Image: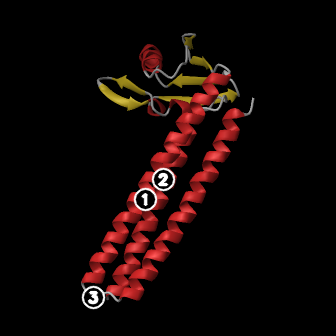
Amino acid sequence: MDIAKAKEAVASAKERMQKAIDHLDVELLAIRAGKASPVLLNSVTVDYYGAQMPLSQVSNISSPDARTIIVQPWEKTMIAPIEKAILAANLGFNPQNNGEQIRINVPALTEERRRELVKQTKGACENTRISLRNTRRDAVEHVKKLQKDGLPEDVAKDTEADLQKQIDAFNKKVDELFAKKEKEIMTV
């Protein structure tokens, strides 16, 4: 029974570590690398008749080319609030409204801005590593508690070794994601 609980702790920790990696993936998508993408506007919320709604729920967002994002509101009356929300989001975009849709030209990145984005990426990766370490710590504490309740010492040591293997594998994934995003950002 205690062995099953130890295996359950490892499985739970692995699931939490995977969620941390998935969150990092989403976070890295939001860091722009000089290309226009509808994902860049995911953080924008619009006042839609008194309720804050994600931009994607009040309009169609597309990227016809590498430097342009088009926001096509479903209601023409929403153009002004959407434009205001994009400016308020402080993403560094200057939306242009033609009465039918909003066009956003994504400016090319300067070398300085690229370095800032790499720092931001590094910070997001470090936060994920911290999350991974905290998950491992919680699982190890759970295993030690089980050991006090009668879990054999060799099983506890094997479980801790398995947890370490898991965290090593997930840290490697974080390193790979960082290297990929850094290359993407620094490529002119």
- Residue 186 quadrant: top right
168 or 17: nearer the viewer: 168
Residue contact between numbered discs 2 and 1, judged by CB atoms under 8 Å: yes
Query: How packed is label 1: few (under 14 Cα within 10 Å), some, or many (20 or more)?
Result: some
**Three-letter amino acid code of the residue under disc 1:** Arg
Residue indicated by mark 2:
129
The residue located at (61%, 49%) in the rendering is 177
- Going from N to C along the chain, the mark reached first, 2 or 3, is 2
**How many numbered circles are shown?**
3
Residue indicated by mark 1:
133
166 or 96: nearer the viewer: 166
Residue 91: x percent and y percent? 51, 23
Residue indicated by mark 3:
150
Residue 110: x percent and y percent? 66, 21
**Three-letter amino acid code of the residue under disc 3:** Gly
- Going from N to C along the chain, the mark reached first, 1 or 3, is 1
Query: How packed is label 3: few (under 14 Cα within 10 Å), some, or many (20 or more)?
Result: few
The residue located at (68%, 21%) in the rendering is 108
